[in-house]
Amino acid sequence: MLKKLLLSTVAIAFVATIQPAEAAESRVLKRIKERGVVNMGHRESSVPFAYIGKDGKPIGYSMDICNMYVDKIRKVLKMPNIKVKHVPVTSQTRIALMANGTIDMECGSTTNNLTRQKQVAYLAVTFITGTKLASKKGSGIKEVEDLNGKAISLSQGTTNEKAIKRIMREKGLKIKIVPVKDHPQGWLALETDRVDAYATDDVLLYGLISKSKNPDQFQVTGRFLSYDPYGIMVPQDDSKYQRLGNVLLADLMRSGEMQKIYDKWFNPGPTGINMPISDTLRVAYEIQALPH
Amino acid sequence: MEFSYNWDWSVLLCTVEDVEIGCIAPYFYWIVEGFGWTIAVASAAWVIAFSWGSFIGILRTLEAPIWLVVPFLKPSMKYKSSVIETGNGAVMINIGWFLHGFATVYVTIFRNIPLLVQMFLWYFVLPEVVSKEAGMWLKREMPLPEYWTAVACLGLYTASRVGEAVRAGINSITQGQHYAAMAIGLTRVQVYRCVLLPVAYRIIIPPLTSDFLGIFKNSSLALTIGVLELTAMTRQIDEYSYQTFEAFTAATVLYILVTAIVMFAMRIVEGRVAIPGMISLGAK
């Protein structure tokens, strides 16, 4: 009798440990389980990665991936009713909100770099871009060297700002920098002739042009001035949770599903951005499609 | 709530990403540089706010007519009550109502539009509504366009608040002093300069201190038009290093330090200049 009781207790304890095993070892999965909610941090104007759609809800390429991530979490935790709470973030708030546990993932257009990895972790690279210049057609600006003696606007604290300043230092270029708060203001500075060029990730430049009043007036020129791989940002030191996302991405990339999601948003995409997949990104998909 | 964050105060002293080369550009310099701009914006804006604000405040307290002498002008019937012929070919026009009205409209507009919106209007809208040449000058040729736009905007905004403080200070002085000063034969300028203003400024030291602290803290809004002041630099360090909390802690300490020093100093000044019997801290 006692033996039986003991056995069943052990059995129950064993079964109890099996099911939430994923959750037990993962800090983030544990808190999602407890809350019954995934807090999805998202950008609001990173077209077409994460932006506010016509119905007021965030949509985009990164949002699609994040929603699949949540589905995966639902499956693993066997909790199909996990809700999603959207938390808008900016480039200034994303790191603090992730560090203090407010958001469980950040979906937008965040560059994955080694410095940032000291505070956060990233899923597999889902987009590859780099710094380019946008200028008015007929301005004669092709490369960054043509800007010597002219003015450029740069978003404060971006990897693009870093890249331009580094090139200026290396080549001894004299370019007047007009720091701006965000993309819309940088674009406004270019539109109103306050500056001769605006530099940011080329995909964002195409997005800004497609949304401007006079798309024909502007051009994106020059070589890539930096290498900016984007990734979904997740809390650090939680490899179980991070792996879950990477399994999802590997599956998507292997099955070709990823290419379909890409085409949905970029080729030509709901905002008319019209960017067929680049060779670099296609190779990145292939390399990251790890086998089971 | 959990907090998964790697504290690393050394970022303020060293950029870690260039660890092989060593400290090539300590972020602390950025903070110092940003702090310098904050002080530069706040103090220049305060010069505008204090002088222009005092002028506006005084205009709002004017009651009796102010006569402007205009030679060779025929008075029209319509404004007869505010126009006097001097007899030697000139007329005197009462512009008191105009000055008073101007000051009131000014305060209403500048105090009621959010500062953030005003910054945007000065920086992005003004160059588009003036002539093309003037607009280009504002945008390209003007030295330090972001800085001077921020100073003008912040100064003119705070002037409306200072103006109200000055008006309240003057109005709080009993009419008897005003009449007594006039009775001994002082001109209106002398009444203000020798009697009303010296008392009014002492009374309004506390609200003026608040306005100064306000201008100091509001200078952080200059980052929206690209002035790399303390908050902007802090954000930049945050973006570059992802060490959010260290950067903002350093900025917070600096802001509190300056405001505390100003408050302490103004309390001493207030005690020193207090007039016994008037509402003031030093008059206890």
Image (tube, rainbow, N blue to C red):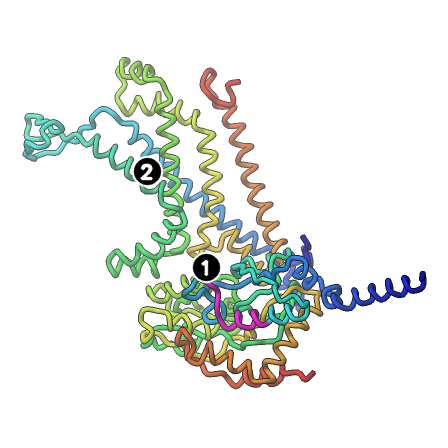
Q: Kindly identify which residue carries mark 2.
A: B107
* Residue range highlighted in magenta: A57-68
Say which of B213 and B196 sits in front: B213
Q: Position of residue A245 (x, y in %)?
A: 64, 72
Q: Is residue A285 left or right of residue A77?
A: left
Q: Residues within 10 Å of mark 2 (few under 14, many from 20)?
A: many
Q: Is residue B247 visible?
A: yes
Label 1 is placed on what type of residue? Lys
Q: Is residue B67 left or right of residue A121?
A: left
Q: Residue sitting at 58 percent across and 72 percent down?
A: A68
Q: Kindly identify which residue carries mark 1.
A: A181
Gap in Å between the C-alphas at discs 1 and 2? 29 Å
Disc 2 secondary structure class:
helix
Q: Is residue B15 left or right of residue A136?
A: right
Q: Is residue A143 left or right of residue B255?
A: left
Disc 1 secondary structure class:
loop
Question: Chain for mark 1?
Answer: A
Q: Indicate yes or no whether the magenta region holds residue A61.
A: yes
Label 2 is placed on what type of residue? Val
Q: Quadrant of residue A211?
A: bottom left
Q: Name the main secondary structure of what is drawn in magenta.
A: helix
B163 up-or-down from A195: above or below: above
Q: Position of residue B169 (x, y in %)?
A: 38, 26
